Image (cartoon, rainbow, N blue to C red):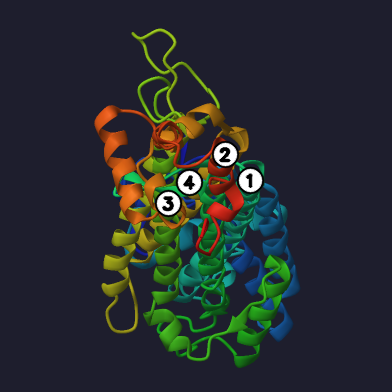
Amino acid sequence: MAVRIEKDTMGTVEVPEGAYYGAQTQRAVDNFPISGLKPHPALVRATVQIKKCAAMANMATGRLNSELGNAIVSAADEALKGDFPDQFVVDPFQAGAGTSHNMNVNEVLANRANELLGGELGNYAKVNPNDHVNMAQSTNDVFPTAMRLAALDLGDQLAQELQELVVALRRKAIEFDGILKSGRTHLQDAVPIRLGQEFAAYAQGIENNLTGLTRTFPGLRELGIGGTAVGTGLNAEEQYIDLIVEKLSRETGQELSRGKDLVERMQNMEPLLALCSSLKGIAVNLIRIANDLRLLSSGPRTGLGEITLPAMQPGSSIMPGKVNPVMAEVTNMVCFHVVGAETAVTMAVQAGQLELNVMMPVIAFNTLFSLEILKNCLHQFTRLCVAGIGVNEERCRSYLDQSVGLATVLAPSIGYAAAAEVAKESAKSGKSIRQVILERGILTEKALDEVLAPFPLTTPGVHGE
C-alpha cells in the first residue's frame, strides 16, 4: 500500500496515501484493533455536525477567518451527505474519553478543507485539525455532546417504531375482541378472558415504554459543549458557547439548551444511563410479549395453538414442514443483548472520576448499538410477526369449555357447592364443564350461552346473579 509520512507531536507516522484521516487516527488504528467494528454512523454524523457548527460559531465571533471556516463547513456538509464513509475508522473500544474518534473527525475535515483550498492531503499549512477544526473545543465536551445528539437521533427513530408496534397491537386487539378464551395464571387454567384484552394489554405496556423512553430526552438535550477540557470553558468565548448551541439546534432539529452547569455535564453521564434504563425496560417487556406469542402459538398440534404467527422460513434442516416463531426468537435475542448492554453502561457511568468520565466510548457504543438493534428489530417484529397474527377460534373455544376456571364463572348462577361438584366431575371424567352442566340439567344450553357471553363475562361485575 502506498503511504505518505505525517508528523504529530510524537513523531512520524505512515498513513495510507489516499486517506483523509491523519497521524493520530492511524496511531489509534494501530493501537486498538479490538472489535473490528467502526464508529456508529450516528456518532460520526453528530460529531461532524458539532465541527460544522463550531466553525460557524467561531467565524461569527471573529476568531476563525471566513476562508478557513467556510472550507471546514463545506467539508462537513460533504461528510453529512455521506461522502468519506470509509474514513471514520477508529474502533469503538479505544483510548479513554474518545480522543481518537474526535481526532479522526478533525483530521478528515481538515484534509478535505485543505483539498478544497488547493492543498494536498497530509499538509495542514492552511487548515489544521487541532487549531482550526477543533477550535474552542476539547474531546471532553465534543464527545459527550456527540453521544447525546446521536442518542436523540436514534431515540426518535426508536420512538416511531414503538408507536408502530402499539398501532399493530391495538389493531389485533380490535380484531380479536369478540374471541373468548381461557385465561391462565401460574400457567394453569384461570377465568375467561377475551383474546383482544390480552393484545390490548400488550399495546398499553408498549405505550408505557414509549412514554418512559421520551421522558429521558430532555436530559439529553441539555449540552455541555463549550465547557472544553474540564467544563470551565477555557479557550471558548462566552458568545461562542451560546452560538454553537443555537446553531446545533438548527442543524439537528432538536430543541437543545446550554447546560446549567458545564462542569456537571462533563462529569455526569447519568442522562445516558437513564436512556439505557428505559431501553432495558422496553427489552424486558418485549421479551415477555414475545414469549407469550411463542407460548400461545406453540404446536401446531401438541402445543397451545390458540394463535398463529406468520410462517417466515423453514424451521429445521432435518424435520420437513417444521416452522418456527423466528421473529419472536430474534426479538428475544436482541432484547437479551440490550439488557446486558445496560449493565455495561451502568458500570461505565459510575466509573467517572473527578472532572471526566473516560469510559464514554463504551457508553456510546452500548447505547447506540442498543438503540440501533432495537429499532431495527421492532420494525421487523411489527411487520413480519404482529401484523400477521391469526387466531384458531375453535382451539380457544375448546380450551375454554374444558377449563376448570369456568367453575368460578358459574358459581354466582348455580352456587359455589354445585360449581365445585361440576369442576370435580369434569376433572375426574375428562368431560368439559359445559358438557357436565348440560348432562346434569343444571342450566339449559341457552342459559349457559348467556352466562358465557364474552363481553359481560370479561368486564367488571358479578355475572349471572
How far, Cα to Cα, is label 4 from label 1? 20 Å
**Secondary structure of the residue carrying numbered label 1:** helix
Kindly indicate whether the residue at mark 3 contacts the one at mark 4 (C-beta within 8 angstroms): no
Question: Which residue was labeled with disc 4?
Answer: 373
Residue named by callout 2: 386
For the point 47% across and 61% down, which residue is it?
103
- Does 269 appear above or below 178? below
Q: Quadrant of residue 363?
A: bottom left
Which of labels 3 and 2 is toward the front?
3
Closest to the observer, 142 or 347: 347
- Residue identified by numbered label 1: 168
* Quadrant location, the N terminus: top left
Residue 78 relative to residue 17: left or right: right
Q: Nearer the viewer, residue 208 or 84?
A: 208
Question: How far apart are the alpha carbons under marks 3 and 2?
Answer: 40 Å
**Nearest-to-viewer mark from 4 and 3:** 3
Image mark for residue 414: 3
Q: Work out whether mark 2 precedes mark 1 in sequence or the reverse, and give the earlier one.
A: 1
> Which mark is first along the chain, 2 or 3?
2
Q: Amino acid at mark 1?
A: Ala
